[in-house]
Amino acid sequence: MDPEIERILRKQGYAIVGKHSAVKLCHWLRESLIHERPCYKQTFYGIKSHRCLQMSPAVNNCTHNCLFCWRFQGFSEVYMKEVDEPEFIVEESIRQQRRLITGYKGDPRVSLEKWKEAMEPRHVAISLTGEPTLYPRLGELIEEYHKRGFTTFLVTNGTMPEILENLDPLPTQLYVTLAAPNEEIYKKLMVPLIKNGWDRLKRTLELLPSLDTRKVIRHTLVKGWNMKNVEEYAKLDTLAEPHFIEPKAYVFVGYSRERLTIENMPSAEEVENFARKLSELTEYKYEDERKDSRVVLLMKENVQRFIE
């Protein structure tokens, strides 16, 4: 890893794993341990926030330079030159998670029993930063987590449809970020680093109905940029046929503050209005919301909401 990138990541609280992976404690893990306030994923899907490991196997590799991304983008690479073994990444990510949580044991606000549970993570969000489908051994990585009893949440920007088409095993739940209703907005907001990024994303949406796993489309909403074309989103969502849709507000954090302003962060009410319009245009019902996270859950009828 580039020494400057490593310095920046460590300063931001990332634990570096090998050549290209990283772990970072989620804000909601802390909230769950200290204040009994779980992440919206626990509210929506039953995932235990204090037992969730947030990691990336491609911390500095991405096909986009999205304006709303919180990561530092000065040294972004699309492809990997050398890759670590999946088993090493999994074991080291768990070890680093435990190291980062160790200090909470002595906090009087934290239940000792809950801390012990947190030391044995059971869910992994393969997201955090970068584009995980650029790690060429992603299927093996998911399999290693499954062997250890983890549920896996994979988040992708959808620009690598050939990877998703051949991914084995599939994650427990697959998220595809769709933050533009058309190619014009996509190019301005996502700033793709590859050719035909929009066409590749469309191919992923067309592929989704054939993938035998739980699927979510996430609409990252940036006020003043991508919230007006609800009808176009509805057509794309209908094409993808996900089980769930999550309209979610952009958050004014990290390096995105150098590219956008706090005025670009929609209110919970604005996200709710977008979601209700989208619900009216699709077969998805308005199922739940978390105003503190500015996110809404839209869901197909007769879908199992909670992960067992």
Image (cartoon, helix red, strand yellow):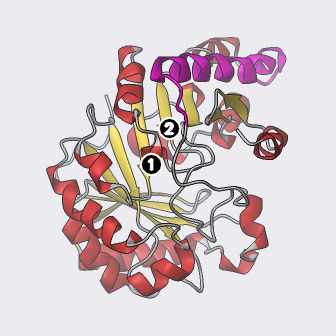
Image position of 227 (left or right of 250): left
Q: Are marks 2 and 1 in contact (CB under 8 Å)?
A: yes
**Nearest the eye: 36 or 62:** 62
Looking at numbered disc 2 in the image, what kind of residue is underneath it? Ala
Looking at numbered disc 1 in the image, what kind of residue is underneath it? Val
Instruction: Work out which quarter of the rendered image holds the C terminus and state it.
Output: top left
Describe the element under mark 1 as helix, strand or loop: strand
Res 28 quadrant in image? top right
Image position of 143 (left or right of 26): left
**Nearest the eye: 236 or 10:** 10
Q: Examine the rendering and report whether any part of residue 283 can be seen.
A: no
Residue linked to disc 1? 155
**Residue placed at 42% from the left, 42% from the top?**
154
- C-alpha span from label 2 to label 1: 8 Å
Locate residue 7, reporting x and y percent. 83, 41
Q: Relative to 285, does residue 145 appear above or below in the rendering? A: above
Mark linked to residue 125? 2
Q: Which residues are magenta?
A: 82-110
